Image: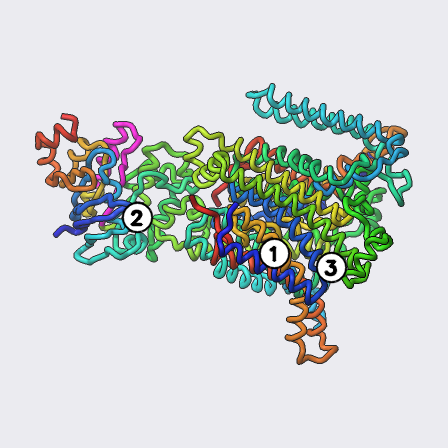
C-alpha cells in the first residue's frame, strides 16, 4: 500500500505538478496566438519574442523594485512588476500594429504576407530584447522558493517520496486560472468581447452590424500583449529568463494552438495541457515509479524513459503532425473565438 | 539569362562594395565575404524556388542546411573501424527495424481505412512496438560506439570519400526530409507548412546535437578534408613562394587569398549551374504552370492541375538546393558544428535575402544573398562605429556607453528586421522584380 | 419621391460596368421586389444601394438626403438594414447573441426590440441559447432577418431571402416579410422566385443586363402578358 502511495507521490512530484505549470504557461501563450489568428487571421511568428519583451520589461521593473526594497514578502516581486511590463508590451504591440500590420490590413493582403511581416517584427523584437538586456541568463525570482519542500512533505506524510511544490508553480497555475476565467468572461459576457467573437466568426457580417474593426483589432492586440507578458513572466519565473528560449518555445506554442484548433480559445488551453503533459510524460524516467509497483527484484535496469529530454520539442512536433494528418482543424475544430 | 542595364548596375555596385572592403579592410576578408555570399545566394535560390515560384513558406531552412552539413561529415570523414565493429551492426539492425516499423504503420493506416478511431490507435501501437524493439538494439550500440575514444572519435565516421560528393548527397538528404514534411503539411493551410518546417528544422538540429554516434553532436567534427590545397602546403612550395615574390605579397597573405579564391571558383560554378537550371525551369512550361498555380490556386485546381503534387515537387527541389548549400558551407568551414545552426541566422536571414532581392526572380535572390550577407558581416563594424560616434561625448566608464558598445552586436538583428519590414512595405517586389510576362 | 431611391446608378466592381442607368426605389410600409434572369445585376443593384460598390454615375437618397458617398456602416446608422444572401449569421454564436450583435450600434436598451423579433419569429425565442450554426436553413434566415431588424431600420434590404429553402418555408418567410412591412418599414428585396415575390410586392423592378426593363406595381407586372411570358414562365 505504501509503495503505491509512494509511486503516486513520485508521479505527482515529477509529472503532474510540472506538467500543470508548464501546461498553464503554454495555454496562456497559445491563447495569444489563437487570438491573433482568430481576429487578424495570420500565424504570428513574433509571439515568442513578444513574450520575451514582456518578460524583459517585467524583469527590469522587478530589479528596480528590488533595489528600492519593495517586495511582496513570500511572493515574487515580479508580480507587482507584471502590470507595468504588460503595459509596456501593450504599447509596443500597438505600435507594431500601427506601423506594420495596419498597412497590410488596409491592403487586404493575404495571410502569408502578414506572416512574413511578423517574421520581420520577430527579428526586430529579438534585437531589441538582446540589445537592452543581453543574450544571457537572468534570474529574477525572489521570495519564498517553495510552498512545500520535499523534506517537509516526507515529514508530514511519513512517505519515502517527497512532494515539492515551487511557489512559482503555484502562482503559475493560479494566475492561469484567473486569467483564463477573466478572458472567457470577457469574451462571452461583455459587448466588446462578443463583438470580437462576431468579428472572428464572420468579418463581413460584423462590419454590416456596425462593429468597428479597428477597435476589435486593438482590443485583440491588447489581450495578446497582456497574455504574452503573463505567460512569458511565469515561464521565466518557473525556469529562468533566456532570450533564445522564447524563439524555441514557438513550436510548442503553435502546436498547442493547432492541436486545439487555431482560433479557438478553449482549444488553445486544452492544446497547451495536451502538449505539456505529453512532453513531460514522454521524457519522464519511469524506473523508480515502476520499482515501487512491481515485486522486489523485478525492477527494470534502464531509466525506462521514452525519449531523452533533449527531444522534448520532438514530442510537440509529433503530436502536431498527428493532428495535421488526422484532423487538421484541431480537436475543437478551430477558427472562431 | 539576360539582365537589364539597371540590374547589371546593381550587381556592379555590389562588386564595388566588396572591392571597397578589400581595399579598406583586407582582401582576405573580402574573399571570405564573397565565399559566404555565394553560399547564401544558393540558399536564397532554394527558398526562391519555393516562395517565388510557388508561394510556399519554408521556415525550416536551417534544418535542411544542417542536413547538408551532416552529409559533409558522413561522406568525407574516414570510417572508424573500431566503432563499426563495436556497434555498427546494432545501429544497422535498429535502422532496419525503424524502416519496417514505418512501413508496417503506413500499411496498418491505409488498410484500416474507414474504421475510425481504431485505425489511429492501431497505427500508434505499431509505431510504439517498433520503437521499443529498435531501442533494444539501438541503445547498447550507441553506448559502445560513443565509448570508442570519445575524445577523438566516438562516432561511426563516414565513407572517406571526396567531400565534393557530399554536396550532392546533402541535396539528396534534404530532399528526403522535405518529401516527408511536404507530404504531411502541403495541401493544408499555408501557415501549416510554415509551422511544420519550423518544427522539423528544430528537430533535425536537436538530433544532430545529441546523437553523438552519428556526427559527434556538440563535440563537433573538425578537420574535414578539403577540396582545395592547404595554406601551409602552398607556403612551403617553391613555385608559390616565387609567385608571391613576383606579385610583391607575402606567401602567407597570398596563400590565404589563393585558398579562398579556389573555394570561390568552386562555389561560383555550383551557383551558376543552379542559377542556370532555375532560370530554365522558370521559363519552361513547368515554371509557367507553377506561377499559374501560385497566382490562382483555385483556377489551376479547376483546370485539373494536381496542385498538391506540384507543390511537393517544388518544395523538395528547393530543399535539395538548400541542402547542397548546407554541405558547401560545412566544406568551407572544414568543420561541422551543430550548435552553430541558429534559426535567425539560417532561416530568417535567408528569407530577408529573398524578399529584399525580389521574390520570384532568380537574379534577385542571388543579389539578395550577396547584399544581405555583406551587410550581415559589415553591420557589426558599422554598428560599432555608430555607437562610438553616439557615445563619443560620454565618459570612458559611463555604464550606458559600455552597455551600448557591448550591445552593438545585436544591432544587426534589428537592422535585418527593419530591412525586411521596409522592403516588404515599400518595394514588395524587391530590388529585381519578377518579370511579368 | 420615394423614401429610399437609387437613381440612374451606373457602375461595377472596378472592371466593366454592370449597372447601366438603373433606378430602384421603395417607400415606407411597402415591399419592392427586384426580379430578373440570372446575371441581370439584381444583387449588384442591391449592393449599390447599400454602398458596397462604387457608383460612377447616379446617386442614392434616403429621406431626401444624399448618401451616395457613405460607407455601408454609415448607412446602417442612417436606418438601413441589410441581409446578405450567404453567411448571414454568426454560426458560432447563439441566436440571442446574433440579435445582440445586430444591435451593436445602438446605445439604448434593446430588450424591447428583441421581444418584437421573438414575437415575429417565435421559434427563435425557443432556440435563443443554441448556436445559430446548428439551426435549419429557414431558421437561419429568420435569425438573419431578425439580426437586421435589431437596429430598428427604416429600410430592410433582403438579398434572396428564400434561396435554398423549401416552398413551405418560403411562404412562411414571405408572410413574415409582409408583417414587417406592415409595421412601416420599407422592404427592398431581390428574388429568384419571381412569381411568388411579385405576388406580395407593391412595386416590382424587372432588370435585364443591368438595366431596368419593366417598372410597375406588382399586380400590373403579374398581369402584363409580356412580363409573364419572358420572366414568369407563362
At horizontal 67% and vertical 59% (from top left) the residue drawn is: B377
Front: mark 1 or 3:
3
**Chain name for mark 2:** C
**In x, y percent, where is residue B229?**
80, 48
Residue with the mark numbered 2: C14
**In x, y percent, where is residue A20?**
68, 45
Q: Is residue B308 above or below residue A35?
A: above
Q: Nearer the viewer, residue B174 or A283?
A: B174
At horizontal 90% and vertical 29% (from top left) the residue drawn is: A297
Q: Do labels 3 and 2 share a chain?
A: no
- CA separation, marks 3 and 2? 58 Å
For this view, does C73 lie left or right of residue A311? left
Q: Which of A254 and C54 is in front in this view?
A: C54
**In x, y percent, where is residue B371?**
60, 56
> Going by the picture, which residue comes out furthest to the top?
B111
Q: Report the number of discs.
A: 3
Amino acid at each position: 500500500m505504501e509503495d503505491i502511495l509512494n509511486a503516486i507521490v513520485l508521479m505527482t512530484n515529477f509529472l503532474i505538478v510540472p506538467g500543470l505549470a508548464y501546461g498553464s504557461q503554454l495555454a496562456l501563450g497559445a491563447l495569444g496566438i489563437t487570438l491573433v489568428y482568430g481576429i487578424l487571421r495570420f500565424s504570428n511568428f513574433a509571439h515568442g519574442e513578444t513574450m520575451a519583451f514582456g518578460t524583459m520589461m517585467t524583469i527590469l521593473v522587478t530589479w528596480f523594485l528590488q533595489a528600492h526594497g519593495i517586495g511582496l514578502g513570500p511572493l515574487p516581486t515580479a508580480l507587482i512588476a507584471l502590470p507595468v511590463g504588460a503595459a509596456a508590451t501593450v504599447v509596443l504591440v500597438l505600435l507594431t500594429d500601427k506601423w506594420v500590420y495596419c498597412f497590410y490590413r488596409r491592403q487586404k493582403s493575404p495571410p502569408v504576407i502578414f506572416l512574413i511581416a511578423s517574421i520581420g517584427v520577430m527579428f526586430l523584437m529579438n534585437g531589441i530584447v538582446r540589445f537592452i538586456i543581453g543574450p544571457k541568463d537572468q534570474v529574477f525570482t525572489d521570495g519564498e522558493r517553495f510552498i512545500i519542500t520535499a523534506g517537509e512533505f516526507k515529514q508530514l506524510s511519513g512517505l519515502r517520496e517527497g512532494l515539492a511544490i515551487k511557489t512559482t508553480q503555484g502562482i503559475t497555475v493560479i494566475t492561469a486560472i484567473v486569467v483564463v476565467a477573466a478572458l472567457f468572461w470577457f469574451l462571452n459576457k461583455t459587448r466588446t468581447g462578443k463583438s470580437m467573437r462576431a468579428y472572428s466568426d464572420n468579418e463581413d457580417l460584423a462590419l454590416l452590424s456596425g462593429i468597428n474593426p479597428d477597435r476589435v483589432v486593438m482590443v485583440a492586440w491588447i489581450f495578446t500583449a497582456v497574455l504574452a507578458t503573463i505567460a512569458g513572466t511565469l515561464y521565466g519565473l518557473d525556469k529562468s529568463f533566456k532570450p533564445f528560449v522564447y524563439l524555441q518555445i514557438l513550436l510548442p506554442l503553435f502546436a498547442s494552438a493547432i492541436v486545439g484548433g487555431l482560433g479557438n480559445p478553449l482549444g488553445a488551453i486544452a492544446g497547451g495541457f495536451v502538449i505539456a503533459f505529453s512532453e513531460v510524460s514522454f521524457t519522464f524516467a519511469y524506473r523508480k515509479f515502476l520499482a515501487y509497483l512491481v515485486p522486489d527484484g523485478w525492477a527494470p535496469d534502464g531509466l525506462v524513459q521514452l525519449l531523452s529530454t533533449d527531444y522534448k520539442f520532438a514530442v510537440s512536433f509529433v503530436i502536431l503532425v498527428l493532428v495535421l494528418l488526422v484532423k487538421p482543424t484541431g480537436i475543437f475544430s478551430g477558427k472562431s473565438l | 539569362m539576360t539582365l537589364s542595364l539597371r540590374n547589371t548596375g546593381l550587381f556592379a555596385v555590389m562588386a564595388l562594395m566588396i572591392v571597397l572592403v578589400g581595399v579598406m579592410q583586407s582582401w582576405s576578408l573580402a574573399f571570405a565575404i564573397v565565399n559566404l555570399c555565394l553560399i547564401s545566394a544558393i540558399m536564397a535560390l532554394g527558398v526562391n524556388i519555393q516562395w517565388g515560384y510557388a508561394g510556399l513558406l519554408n521556415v525550416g531552412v536551417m534544418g535542411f542546411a544542417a542536413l547538408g552539413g551532416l552529409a559533409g561529415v558522413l561522406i568525407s570523414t574516414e570510417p572508424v573501424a573500431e566503432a563499426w565493429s563495436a556497434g555498427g551492426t546494432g545501429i544497422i539492425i535498429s535502422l532496419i527495424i525503424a524502416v519496417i516499423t514505418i512501413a508496417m504503420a503506413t500499411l496498418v493506416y491505409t488498410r484500416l481505412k474507414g474504421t475510425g478511431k481504431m485505425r489511429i490507435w492501431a497505427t500508434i501501437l505499431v509505431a510504439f512496438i517498433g520503437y521499443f524493439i529498435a531501442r533494444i538494439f539501438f541503445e547498447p550500440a550507441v553506448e559502445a560506439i560513443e565509448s570508442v575514444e570519445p575524445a577523438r572519435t566516438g562516432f561511426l565516421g563516414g565513407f572517406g570519400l571526396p567531400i565534393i560528393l557530399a554536396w550532392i548527397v546533402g541535396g539528396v538528404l534534404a530532399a528526403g526530409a522535405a518529401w516527408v514534411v511536404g507530404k504531411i503539411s502541403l495541401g493544408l493551410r499555408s501557415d501549416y507548412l510554415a509551422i511544420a518546417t519550423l518544427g522539423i528544422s528544430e528537430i533535425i538540429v536537436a538530433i544532430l546535437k545529441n546523437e553523438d554516434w552519428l556526427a559527434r553532436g556538440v563535440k563537433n567534427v573538425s578537420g574535414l578534408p578539403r577540396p582545395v590545397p592547404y595554406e601551409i602546403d602552398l607556403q612551403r612550395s617553391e613555385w608559390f613562394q616565387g609567385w608571391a615574390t613576383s606579385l610583391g605579397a607575402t606567401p602567407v597573405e597570398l596563400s590565404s587569398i589563393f585558398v579562398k579564391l579556389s573555394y570561390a571558383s568552386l562555389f561560383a560554378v555550383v551557383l551558376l549551374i543552379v542559377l542556370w537550371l532555375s532560370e530554365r525551369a522558370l521559363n519552361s512550361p513547368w515554371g509557367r504552370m507553377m506561377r499559374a498555380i501560385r497566382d490562382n490556386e483555385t483556377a489551376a485546381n479547376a483546370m485539373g492541375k494536381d496542385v498538391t503534387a506540384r507543390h511537393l515537387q517544388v518544395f523538395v527541389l528547393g530543399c535539395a538546393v538548400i541542402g547542397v548549400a548546407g554541405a558547401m558551407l560545412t566544406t568551407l568551414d572544414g568543420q561541422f558544428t551543430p550548435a552553430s545552426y541558429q534559426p535567425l541566422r539560417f532561416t530568417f536571414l535567408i528569407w530577408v535575402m529573398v524578399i529584399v532581392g525580389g521574390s520570384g526572380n532568380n537574379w534577385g535572390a542571388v543579389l539578395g544573398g550577396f547584399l544581405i550577407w555583406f551587410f550581415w558581416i559589415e553591420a557589426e563594424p558599422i554598428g560599432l562605429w555608430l555607437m562610438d560616434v553616439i557615445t563619443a561625448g560620454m565618459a570612458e566608464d559611463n555604464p550606458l556607453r559600455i552597455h551600448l558598445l557591448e550591445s552593438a552586436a545585436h544591432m544587426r538583428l534589428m537592422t535585418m528586421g527593419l530591412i525586411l519590414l521596409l522592403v516588404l512595405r515599400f518595394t514588395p517586389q524587391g530590388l529585381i522584380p519578377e518579370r511579368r510576362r | 419621391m420615394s423614401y429610399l431611391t437609387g437613381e440612374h446608378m451606373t457602375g461595377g466592381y472596378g472592371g466593366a460596368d454592370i449597372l447601366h442607368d438603373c433606378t430602384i426605389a421603395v417607400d415606407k410600409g411597402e415591399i419592392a421586389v427586384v426580379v430578373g434572369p440570372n446575371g441581370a445585376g439584381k444583387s449588384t443593384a442591391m449592393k449599390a444601394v447599400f454602398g458596397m460598390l462604387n457608383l460612377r454615375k447616379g446617386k442614392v437618397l434616403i429621406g431626401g438626403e444624399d448618401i451616395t458617398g457613405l460607407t455601408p456602416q454609415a448607412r446602417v446608422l442612417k436606418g438601413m438594414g441589410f441581409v446578405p444572401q450567404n453567411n448571414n449569421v454568426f454560426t458560432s454564436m447563439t441566436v440571442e447573441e446574433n440579435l445582440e450583435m445586430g444591435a451593436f450600434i445602438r446605445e439604448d436598451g434593446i430588450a424591447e426590440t428583441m421581444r418584437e423579433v421573438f414575437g415575429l419569429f417565435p421559434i427563435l425565442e425557443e432556440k435563443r441559447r443554441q448556436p445559430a450554426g446548428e439551426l435549419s436553413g429557414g431558421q437561419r434566415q429568420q435569425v438573419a432577418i431578425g439580426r437586421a431588424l435589431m437596429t430598428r431600420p427604416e429600410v430592410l434590404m433582403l438579398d434572396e431571402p428564400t434561396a435554398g429553402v423549401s416552398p413551405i418555408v418560403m411562404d412562411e418567410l414571405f408572410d413574415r416579410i409582409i408583417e414587417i412591412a406592415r409595421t412601416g418599414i420599407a422592404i427592398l428585396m431581390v428574388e429568384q422566385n419571381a412569381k411568388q415575390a411579385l405576388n406580395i410586392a407593391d412595386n416590382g423592378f424587372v432588370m435585364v443586363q443591368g438595366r431596368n426593363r419593366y417598372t410597375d406595381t406588382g399586380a400590373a407586372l403579374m398581369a402584363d402578358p409580356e412580363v409573364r411570358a419572358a420572366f414568369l414562365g407563362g
